[in-house]
Every structure is written in structure tokens, then in C-alpha cells.
Image (spheres, grey):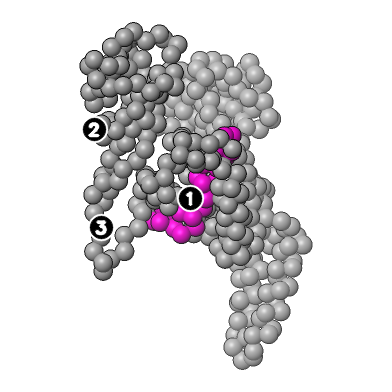
């Protein structure tokens, strides 16, 4: 099966008599306009056409505009058996569905291909930001990295963890962690806020050997330990929790036998077995209140525009694993069922319809041959009303309940 579409495109000049177009027209369907004047096809007339190449019988000036309107046949998947339901599975199929919904190919939809692509992007972004099926909860794990410096030659002496590294030129100091197996890379955490410079000489506490940082812009890499943030991908919409969190208990992040939750379970769990859960509920409320009073708000900050998660822990530990509870946007290219979502299809169709009305409004009142009058404002108003109803429905039926969200 195939679907026929109307294409309008501007021909590209090859030389003074030859022009090319992007798509191959269906036979005998093209209309070629030279500066708005319809040309006649034929070897003894104005032009001839072979596939995508148009050859004029007279020279064309370089400032003249050649527009071509034609039909193309696009293959469509065969109809599925009546016992199965096959939805849209690609961006292209979604676009074709929207155009058919608006009346193509019976009606010429006056919207440019780039405008259609923009409206599809807009619909997918709105679906991602507000629809509960546009995101999924997941846990992202990151290992905190140290800053590193690369030396010109291998450092042969052993480096004691916690030793102070001093830059002879910059005056920067840092706490050393270790060195790589080849001795050319040293991991560290900045101490006095100053930055090491490329090419400078360094000394390490309790060591007689000095080293020289490689004279390259990539010689010094600042890690998570100094940045105090973690870079996450653009698909992350929000951060809702961090594990481990800063703790107000004696045991700190590690907890252990001094952790309040551990002590409560150790001393009261057997008593709870002989009574109701009211006592347990009251204890949990007290614990939650104490944690909030001593710890305050959750120690995580995130902004979608920077893709950085700032974690306000008292002390970052290199190589420590951080687990972030996050909402991540679905990738339609991977999860193609997004294109079949009822809201995505209706919202994308209404957006394209609104664009169609916007385009036609500029020619409002113009009467076409046959007595037809363009009425872009009515199309635009209908599409705007449809979008408002869809947005209201989204808030009532498809939006996630309020939650603690950073981002």
C-alpha cells in the first residue's frame, strides 16, 4: 500500500538551465513555477523533467525563484490482521497519522516540513514534562571521583594517603589519595582553594622526590570531590531522593550499632509484638520529627538546565557510591509506544492544526479560484480550543501527584 502526499519545494540551481528537487515526483503530477508563473512541460515548451532534474529550454537568471509542487507516493505498512492491534512505531508514522487526521491527502495541509518537526518536538516535550507515562522512576548510581593531575614522568616514590601536595608556582595545596600503576597520575582533593597550573613543579609531604605536571590543558581534571556536584544526563527530569543521606544520628551516614533506628528496633521490636501498631506509629512520627529538626531539608539540589546534582553532604568521600532516586524521561526512539499514546497523537495533531491556521491567517480573506475563501483564523481558534481542553484533561487525569521534586 502507498499514501499520496502533496509536496512543495524550491528547486536548487545547478546551472543556468538545470535545477534539481529533493523528492521524486509521481509521473505527470509536477507543476513548475518560475517567479510565480506556471511553466509548460515539453521539449518544445518551457522545460523537461527527468526524475529529480528539471531542464529549462531557456536560461534562468540566478535571482529567479523556481518552485515545484508535486505528488509523491509513500509506502505504508500493510493493514494488520483484524485480531491484532498495531500502533504507531516511529516519528514518521506519527506525522503521517496527524496529516491524515487533518484531511491529507484530500486537503492540502499548508504546513512546512520543518514546522511539522517542531510541533512534534513540542508535543513530545509536553508529554515528557507533564504526563505520568512520559517518565519513569529509576535509581542512578555514581561513584564519587577524585581530581587528578598527570605528570610528565612517572613518580617513583610511594605516596601516603593524606599527604599534602604543594604547587611550587601556584601555591595550591591538596590532599593526596594515591597514584596510578604507571606512576604518572596522582589523585587528590584540593585543600586551600587555589588551583594547580600546568607545567608547574609539585612536592609531596615526607617525600624527597618532586614531580612536574604535564604542560597540557588536560593535565589537571577536577573531579566530583572538588566540584561538589555530579553530572547527570539530559533525560533526568527531577531528583527525589539521595542514598545515603546525611544523618543526624550518632552513627552518621554509616549508622551501625549507634544508629537510632537500630537501637529502636533492638529494644522495642519484641514489645510491639504484644501490642497494637499505635505505639510503633507514634515512635516513627517522633523519629521523623527529630530527623527533620536536626537535619532539615534533603541535601540535594538539581537544575535541569545545568544537568548537575549538587549534594550537600558534610564530607564527600572519594570512591563512595551515591544512589539518586530520579525521574527520567522516556526516549521515544527506544520506547516507540510513546508515538501511539492517545495524548501524544491528539496533542501533536492539534499543534500542527494550530500551525496550519497560523500560516493561513496571513492570507485571510483571499478568494481562491472556484470561489473558495481562506479562513485560517477559524482553524487556528479550533486548534487552540482543542489544545486547552487537552491540557486541562492532562492535569485532571494524567499528571503525577505532587511530590518532593528537585529540578
Q: Which residue is mark 2?
A: 27
Point out residue 278 in the picture as x, y percentages from the top left corner. 68, 85
- 248, 372: nearer the viewer: 372
Q: Residues within 10 Å of mark 1 (few under 14, many from 20)?
A: many
User: Of callouts 2 and 1, which one flags the residue occurring earlier in the amino acid sequence?
Assistant: 2
Say left or right for 293 vs 185.
Answer: right
Q: Which residue is mark 1?
A: 349
What's the distance in space between the residues labelled 2 and 1, CA to CA?
30 Å
Closer to the eye: label 2 or 1? 2
Packing grade of label 3 (10 A; few <14, some 14-19, many >=20) is: few
Q: Secondary structure at mark 2?
A: loop
- Residue for badge 3: 79
Q: Earlier in the sequence, mark 1 or mark 3?
A: 3
Query: Where does residue 362 sit, x and y in percent of width and height?
Result: 59, 34
Is residue 104 placed above or below 325 in the rendered structure?
above
SS for callout 1? helix
Amino acid at each position: 500500500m502507498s499514501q499520496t502526499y502533496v509536496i512543495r519545494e524550491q528547486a536548487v540551481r545547478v546551472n543556468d538551465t538545470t535545477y534539481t528537487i529533493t523528492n521524486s515526483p509521481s509521473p505527470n503530477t509536477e507543476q513548475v513555477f518560475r517567479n510565480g508563473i506556471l511553466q509548460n512541460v515539453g521539449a518544445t515548451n518551457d522545460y523537461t523533467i527527468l526524475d529529480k532534474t528539471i531542464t529549462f529550454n531557456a536560461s534562468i537568471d540566478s535571482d529567479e525563484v523556481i518552485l515545484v509542487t508535486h505528488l509523491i507516493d509513500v509506502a505504508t505498512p500493510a493493514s494488520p490482521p483484524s485480531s491484532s492491534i498495531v500502533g504507531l512505531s516511529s516519528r514518521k508514522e506519527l506525522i503521517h497519522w496527524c496529516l491524515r487526521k487533518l484531511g491529507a491527502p484530500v486537503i492540502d495541509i499548508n504546513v512546512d516540513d520543518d514546522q511539522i518537526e517542531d510541533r512534534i518536538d513540542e508535543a513530545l516535550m509536553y508529554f515528557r514534562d507533564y504526563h505520568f507515562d512520559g517518565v519513569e522512576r529509576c535509581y542512578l548510581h555514581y561513584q564519587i571521583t577524585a581530581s587528578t593531575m598527570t605528570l610528565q614522568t612517572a613518580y617513583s616514590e610511594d605516596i601516603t594517603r593524606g599527604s599534602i601536595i604543594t604547587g611550587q608556582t601556584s601555591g595550591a595545596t591538596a590532599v593526596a589519595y594515591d597514584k596510578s600503576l604507571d606512576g604518572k597520575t596522582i589523585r587528590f582533593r584540593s585543600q586551600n582553594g587555589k588551583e594547580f597550573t600546568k607545567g608547574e613543579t609539585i612536592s609531596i609531604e615526607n617525600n624527597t622526590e618532586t614531580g612536574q605536571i604535564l604542560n597540557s590543558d588536560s593535565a589537571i581534571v577536577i573531579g566530583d570531590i572538588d566540584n561538589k556536584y555530579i553530572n547527570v544526563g539530559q533525560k533526568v527530569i527531577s531528583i527525589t531522593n539521595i542514598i545515603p543521606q546525611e544523618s543526624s544520628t550518632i552513627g552518621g551516614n554509616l549508622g551501625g550499632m549507634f544508629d537510632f533506628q537500630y537501637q529502636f528496633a533492638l529494644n522495642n521490636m519484641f514489645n510491639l509484638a504484644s501490642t497494637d501498631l499505635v505505639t510503633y506509629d507514634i515512635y516513627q512520627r517522633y523519629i521523623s520529627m527529630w530527623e527533620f529538626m536536626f537535619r532539615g531539608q534533603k541535601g540535594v539540589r538539581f537544575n535541569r538546565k545545568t544537568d548537575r546534582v549538587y549534594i550537600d553532604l558534610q564530607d564527600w568521600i572519594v570512591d563512595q557510591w551515591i544512589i539518586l532516586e530520579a525521574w527520567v524521561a522516556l526516549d521515544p526512539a527506544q520506547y516507540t509506544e510513546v508515538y501511539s499514546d492517545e495524548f501524544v497523537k491528539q496533542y501533536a495533531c492539534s499543534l500542527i492544526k494550530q500551525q496550519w491556521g497560523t500560516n493561513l491567517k496571513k492570507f485571510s480573506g483571499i478568494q481562491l479560484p472556484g470561489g473558495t475563501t481562506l479562513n485560517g483564523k477559524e482553524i487556528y481558534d479550533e486548534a487552540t480550543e482543542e489544545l486547552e481542553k487537552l491540557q486541562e484533561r492532562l492535569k485532571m487525569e494524567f499528571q503525577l501527584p505532587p511530590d518532593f521534586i528537585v529540578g
